């Protein structure tokens, strides 16, 4: 058995033993759906654009057209993306009764499209727009159609400026979302991190929070992270190559145990 096979078996065993599993996902969860992450060497978006030029509230208000053009470029990939093997494996794990919920930093809606339940979208969603004045939420297509037809992307209710309903740089996360995340992590006994550099706060705190609750940590991420040393198991591979194998082992074992 190779070292990797042993890790796969070990993570399957940890999942089978756990009673309260929470998964945290980042942009690496969706790269296999064709959506670039921010920090992968060579392909990450931050090698191509200055994060402070786009995606902060002040730059959006000052240069709405320029920001929206850039966001539409990124959005195209999001709108045409489909859930990948990794998203589907998580949905399967949940159907097996082994996954309480998913905390995601992603704004692409792919966990929900893969029919996972109890998905907390910490950074909001790119599939909606919100009015910066009255907080009315509309489908993103309403905003995009206005912009592409040359009219101002403004709210039909109050004429305020619409923005994608995703958290921009410098914006705080919504308190109700933070509370839901805290509740999900409370009592968790296995915390699985998939495809996140863990460099963005408050998500970067969550692994330590889970550890302090007595949870074990498992990580599948191509690159190293700062919490690798605290994890029970770390696999530096692609999620889509590894996670479906693990969930298959878990499913087999559960079915075997049912027959006994
Ligand atoms: N899909 C999306 O919605 C999307 C895309 C880009 C950025 N973002 C936003 O970017 C911020 C960046 O933080 P982050 O930690 O989520 O992303 P990040 O770009 O900082 O880190 C992604 C990590 O995933 C790893 N990775 C990439 N592809 C992988 C794969 N197939 N299998 C396993 N690991 C893989 C990389 O090695 C990297 O460490 C988040 O706030 C998120 O909202 C979201
Ligand atoms: Zn409004």
Image (tube, rainbow, N blue to C red):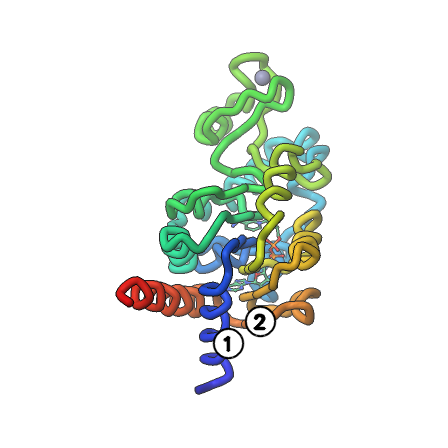
Q: Is residue 244 left or right of residue 151?
A: left
Label 2 crowd bin: few (<14), some (14–19), many (20+), radius 10 Å: some
| Mark nearer the N terminus (2 vs 1) | 1
Which residue does the image show at 64% across and 43% down from the upper left?
Answer: 182
- Horizontal side of 97 relative to 212 (left or right) equals left
**Residue in front for this viewpoint, 215 or 105:** 215
Q: Percent position (x, y) of residue 251? A: 35, 63
Q: Secondary structure at mark 2?
A: strand
Q: Which mark is residue 7?
A: 1
Considering only vertical position in the picture, is 31 above or below 128?
A: below
Q: Is residue 184 above or below residue 136?
A: below
Q: Quadrant of ligand 2?
A: top right
Residue annotated with mark 2: 233
Q: Foreground: 7 or 60?
A: 7
- Out of 250 and 108, give the one closest to the viewer: 250
Q: Pointer 2 and pointer 1: residues touching (CB < 8 Å)?
A: yes
């Amino acid at each position: 058995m190779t070292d990797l096979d042993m890790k796969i078996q070990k993570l399957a065993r940890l999942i089978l033993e756990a009673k309260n599993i929470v998964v945290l996902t980042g942009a690496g969860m969706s790269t296999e759906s064709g959506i670039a992450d921010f920090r992968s060497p060579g392909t990450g978006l931050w090698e191509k654009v200055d994060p402070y030029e786009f995606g902060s509230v002040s730059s959006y208000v000052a240069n709405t057209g320029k920001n929206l053009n850039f966001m539409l470029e990124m959005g195209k990939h999001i709108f045409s993306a489909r859930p990948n093997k990794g998203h589907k494996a998580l949905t399967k794990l949940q159907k097996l009764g082994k996954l309480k919920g998913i905390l995601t930093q992603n704004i692409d809606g792919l966990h929900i499209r893969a029919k996972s339940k109890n998905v907390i979208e910490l950074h909001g969603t790119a599939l909606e727009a919100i009015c910066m004045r009255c907080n009315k939420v509309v489908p993103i297509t309403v905003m995009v159609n206005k912009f592409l037809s040359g009219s101002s992307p403004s709210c039909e209710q109050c004429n305020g400026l619409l923005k994608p309903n995703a958290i921009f740089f410098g914006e705080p996360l919504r308190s109700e979302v933070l509370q839901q995340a805290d509740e999900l992590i409370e009592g968790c006994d296995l915390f699985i991190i998939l495809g996140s550099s863990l460099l963005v706060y408050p998500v970067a705190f969550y692994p330590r929070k889970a550890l302090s609750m007595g949870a074990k940590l498992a990580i599948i991420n191509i690159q190293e992270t700062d919490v690798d040393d605290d994890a029970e198991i770390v696999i530096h591979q692609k999620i889509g190559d590894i996670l479906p194998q693990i969930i298959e082992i878990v499913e087999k074992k559960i079915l075997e145990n049912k027959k006994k």
